[in-house]
Amino acid sequence: MYNLRPANSNGRECIVSLVDSKSDLYNSVFLKACRGEQTAYTPIWLNRQAGRYMPEYHQVKGNTPSLDFFKTPELAAKATLDAQRILGVDAAIMFADLLPILEPMGLELDYIPGVGPNIANPIRKLADIDAIQVQSAAETMPYIGAVIALIRAGLPADIPLIGFGGAPFTLASYAIEGKGSRNYVAVKQLMYGDTVAWHQLMEKISDCVIDYMNYQIESGVQAIQLFDSWVGCLAPIDYQQYVFAHTERVIQAIKGQVPVIYFGTGNPALAKQMAAAGCDVLGLDWRSPLVKTWDETAVKAVQGNLDPIVLCATKTAVEQKAKELLDEVDGRAGHIFNLGHGIIPETPVENVKALVDFVHTYSARSS
């Protein structure tokens, strides 16, 4: 079922695939929870559910460099589908990374073994911001559309596919720092020292994110998660002054087509402002009290928020901590069970499977 929607931010008309309200996909537990509807059991999927902790992931990746892995649709699709099948989770998330979107902007990205992402030409001066290009994701990142098509074709009819991207602040931070950061010195030097330049950069990045998210929706994802992985370094007043308007613009430009999940880490004090940006689902890390934050933000649905390190303990501990969280929620409509961040490589696969099984059985019993 298809519908023509108005031209997007790039001015082109787009065909958007709509989910029939009578279909298994529309009535999946994950999408029902995103809409704040009651479900037969609590849906669960996990941040970084396809990753280095899983032997099948290493079999697929082999010696393929990370950037090539993300850009090879057949490999990325298999990693995505394997994780959903092996774990039995209620949604798949496209296997990709936040940062390849920076390449069409003109930034030289690589993934260094043992180090992580690295940008050879980080933003350091005004001319670097002027040089940032806003291009069509469909033209510069065609592998994304291809991997979405392959995943959607391989998923069960009732399992939604989540697309995702980095939020403007997190992408800007990587672009400026050029690599991982502990104190975000270069980011805050620009943010505090040249506010006009900062907002120019954020506007350009936001334009790219909007186009990229719409491209994923056009290609066939059923939900979008916006990751603000580095936003926790900000004070609430700084989030309001330097970030909020840009994040809100991105969310408002894509919502209404599919559910939008906004997930940030590191600072529970930002939850109200993040919710005010207009997401359909607020993703919480483990530092936030889930139900208290849910009530305070008045969002329709929440996602989270088990500490991922719990999965490195015993199965008994995994089930106990999951039980505590489910008991706190007490069957309230609109809860999507997830971790408060991504699965780490040291995690036993058996514990992840045990978590998924427990959430399904215990929430169904107590609902």
Image (cartoon, grey):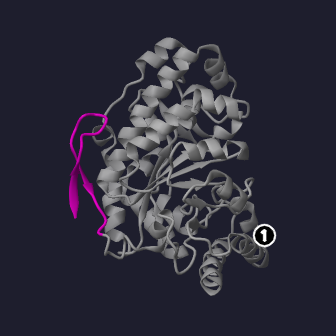
**280 in magenta:** no
Q: Position of residue 92 (x, y in %)?
A: 46, 65
Crowd around label 1: few <14 · some 14–19 · many ≥20 (10 Å): few
Please report the residue visible at 43 percent of the width from the left and 57 percent of the height from the top. 223
Please report the residue visible at 34 percent of the width from the left and 65 percent of the height from the top. 152
Q: Position of residue 12 (x, y in %)?
A: 22, 38
Is residue 63 depicted above or below 85 in this figure?
Answer: above
Rendered image quadrant of residue 359: bottom right
Please report the residue visible at 41 percent of the width from the left and 18 percent of the height from the top. 131
Rendered image quadrant of residue 356: bottom right
**9 in magenta:** yes
Q: Is residue 157 visible?
A: yes
Is residue 308 depicted above or below 229 in this figure?
Answer: below
Q: Is 237 left, or right, of 119 in this rendering?
A: right
- Residue kind at label 1, given as amino acid type: Ala
Q: Nearest the camera: 156 or 350?
A: 156
